[in-house]
C-alpha cells in the first residue's frame, strides 16, 4: 500500500522543537524504566533471597505485559488521542518505581512488574502518532533521530544513576529517586499539554479501498504491517544479544578484561545515540531510506562476524562495539520513515502499537535462545546468530516498500 498520509504543513521551528523535546524526554523515561531492576539484581538477589532465574522472570513478565499493552494501546491512541494515554503510561511507570522501592516480597515485585509493563506499552503508539501528526514534514528525520537517541540515552543513564545511589544509600532510595524522575516528567507533560493536545485520528474516508474499510482491525490485513512487525522482532533479537550476552561472549572469545567487557555496552549505546543523530541528517531525502538501512546494517553484521571468526586484539573489541552501535543508530531514522510511509493516516496508533509489539516479543524470547548457547560455551555462535538476525533485518527493510503496494488478502 502507499501511505494515505499527507505532508504536514510547515510550522515554526520552536513549535516543532517543543514537541520533539517533550516526546523525546518521555521516551527516555520509558527506556530508563526498562532498566530499573537489572542493574540492581545483585542487591535484590540478597534482599529477597531469590536467584537470577527468578529475577530474570520479572523482566519476562514486564515485556510480556508490555507487548499486549503496546498492541492494544494503539486503539486507545486513535480513539482518544495520544495525550491522555501518554500521561497514563507515565503515571503507571512512576507508580511501579515507587512500588518496587516499597516491596517487601518477591510477589510484590511481580505485581509491580505488571504495572510497569502496562506503563511501558503505551509509548511507541503515542510517540509516533505525535511526531507524525504534530511535526512538520521537513523535520521528521530529525524528530525520529531525537526519538531514537533519547531511548538509547535512557538505557545508558539508568545504571549510572541507580547503581551509585544504591552503593551510597540503598536500592530502595535509588528506586524512589527513579520514581521522582518519572513523576517530574509527568508534570512537564501536563504543563505542556496544550502543545501536545491532538484530536483522535480521523475516520477513513469512504471509497478508499479495503485497507480503510470495515472494522478497526482491517489494517491487520496489510502485508506491510507484518513486514514492519518482522523488522522490529528481528531488531529486538539483535538488541537482546547485545544488551545481555554479547559483551561476555566477546570477553570469552578474545580474552577481554572484565572491566573492558562492562564498558562495551556503554560504548555501544553512546555510539548508537551518535549514529541516530547522523541518521537524522542522512534521511532528509526519503528515497534513500532503504539504502541507508542496507549499508548500515550490513556493516553491523560484518562486525558481528568479525567478532565471531577473527582473532582480534582485546583493545579492538570495545572499538568494534562502538562502530556497530554507530551503524545501527544510523539506520534508526530511516527505519521510522519507512514505517510512516507504510502507515494509513487513520490507523497510526494501531499500526505502531502492533509493529512495535515485535520489540517486546523479541526481547522476551531471544534470551531463551541465546542463554543455552552461553551455557554451552558456544560463544562464537552467539555472535553468528546476531549477524544472522542483522542480515535478516536488511531483507525485511528492503521488502517493506515492495509489499506496501500489495492489497490485503
Image (cartoon, helix red, strand yellow):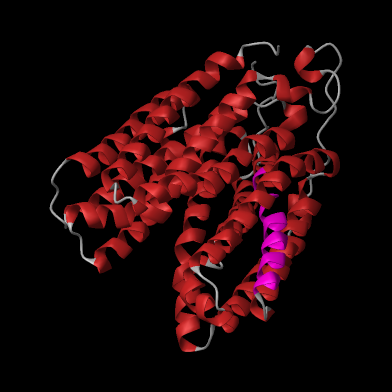
**Residue at the spot 30% in from the left edge and 41% down from the top edge:** 381
Magenta residues span: 106-124
Instruction: Based on the picture, tell me whether residue 120 belongs to the magenta stretch.
Output: yes
Q: Position of residue 405 (x, y in %)?
A: 61, 12
| Residue 388 occupies quadrant | top left
The answer to whether residue 318 of the structure is visible from this angle is: no
Of residues 307 and 156, the one nearer the viewer is 307
The answer to whether residue 75 of the structure is visible from this angle is: yes
**Residue at the spot 62% in from the left edge and 72% down from the top edge:** 181
Q: From the image, which quarter does the N terminus lie in?
A: top right
Q: Is residue 258 left or right of residue 12?
A: left
Position of 162 relative to 288 (above/below): below
| Residue 213 occupies quadrant | top right
Q: Is residue 405 left or right of residue 319?
A: right
Of residues 155 and 384, the one nearer the viewer is 384
Q: From the image, which quarter does the C terminus lie in?
A: top right
Residue at the outermost front position:
376
Q: Position of residue 129 (x, y in %)?
A: 70, 40
Give the main secondary structure of the magenta stretch. helix
Q: Position of residue 182 (x, y in %)?
A: 65, 68
Instruction: Based on the picture, tell me whether residue 12 belongs to the magenta stretch.
Output: no
**Residue at the spot 45% in from the left edge and 84% down from the top edge:** 167
Of residues 282 and 104, the one nearer the viewer is 104
| Residue 215 occupies quadrant | top right
Q: Is residue 159 left or right of residue 76?
A: left
Q: How many marks?
A: 0
Position of 211 relative to 16 (above/below): above
Q: Is residue 158 left or right of residue 264?
A: right
**Residue at the spot 54% in from the left edge and 36% down from the top edge:** 232
Amino acid at each position: 500500500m502507499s501511505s494515505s498520509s499527507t505532508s504536514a504543513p510547515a510550522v515554526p521551528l520552536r513549535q516543532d522543537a517543543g514537541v520533539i523535546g517533550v516526546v523525546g524526554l518521555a521516551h527516555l523515561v520509558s527506556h530508563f524504566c526498562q532498566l530499573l531492576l537489572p542493574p540492581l539484581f545483585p542487591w535484590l538477589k540478597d534482599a529477597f533471597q531469590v536467584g537470577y532465574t527468578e529475577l530474570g522472570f520479572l523482566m519476562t513478565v514486564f515485556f510480556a505485559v508490555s507487548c499486549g499493552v503496546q498492541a492494544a494501546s494503539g486503539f486507545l491512541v486513535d480513539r482518544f488521542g495520544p495525550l491522555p494515554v501518554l500521561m497514563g503510561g507515565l503515571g503507571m511507570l512512576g507508580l511501579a518505581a515507587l512500588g518496587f522501592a516499597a516491596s517487601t516480597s518477591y510477589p510484590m515485585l511481580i505485581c509491580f512488574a505488571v504495572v510497569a509493563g502496562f506503563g511501558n506499552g503505551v509509548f511507541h503508539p503515542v510517540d509516533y502518532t505525535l511526531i507524525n501528526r504534530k511535526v512538520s514534514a521537513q523535520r521528521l528525520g530529525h524528530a525520529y533521530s531525537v526519538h531514537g537517541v533519547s531511548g538509547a540515552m535512557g538505557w545508558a543513564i539508568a545504571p549510572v544513576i541507580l547503581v551509585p545511589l544504591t552503593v551510597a544509600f540503598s536500592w530502595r532510595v535509588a528506586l524512589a529517586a527513579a520514581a521522582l524522575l518519572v513523576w517530574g516528567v509527568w508534570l512537564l507533560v501536563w504543563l505542556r499539554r496544550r502543545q501536545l493536545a491532538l484530536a483522535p485520528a480521523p475516520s477513513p474516508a469512504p471509497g478508499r479501498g479495503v485497507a480503510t474499510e470495515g472494522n478497526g482491525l482491517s489494517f491487520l490485513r496489510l502485508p506491510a504491517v507484518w513486514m514492519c512487525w518482522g523488522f522490529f522482532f528481528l531488531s529486538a533479537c539483535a538488541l537482546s544479544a547485545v544488551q545481555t550476552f554479547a559483551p561476555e561472549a566477546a570477553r570469552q572469545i578474545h580474552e577481554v578484561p572484565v572491566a573492558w567487557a562492562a564498558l562495551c555496552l556503554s560504548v555501544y549505546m553512546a555510539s548508537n545515540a551518535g549514529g541516530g543523530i547522523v541518521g537524522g541528517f542522512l534521511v532528509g531525502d526519503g528515497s534513500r531510506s532503504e539504502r541507508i538501512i542496507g549499508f548500515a546494517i550490513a556493516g553491523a553484521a560484518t562486525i558481528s562476524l568479525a567478532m565471531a571468526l577473527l582473532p582480534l586484539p582485546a583493545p579492538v573489541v570495545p572499538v568494534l562495539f562502538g562502530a556497530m552501535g554507530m551503524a545501527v543508530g544510523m539506520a534508526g531514522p530511516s527505519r521510522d520513515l519507512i514505517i510512516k510511509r507504510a502507515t494509513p493516516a487513520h490507523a497510526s496508533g494501531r499500526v505502531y502499537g502492533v509493529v512495535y509489539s515485535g520489540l517486546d516479543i523479541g526481547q522476551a524470547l531471544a534470551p531463551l535462545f541465546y542463554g543455552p548457547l552461553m551455557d554451552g560455551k558456544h560463544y562464537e555462535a552467539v555472535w553468528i546468530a546476531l549477524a544472522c538476525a542483522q542480515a535478516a533485518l536488511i531483507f525485511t527493510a528492503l521488502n517493506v516498500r515492495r509489499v506496501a503496494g500489495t492489497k490485503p488478502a
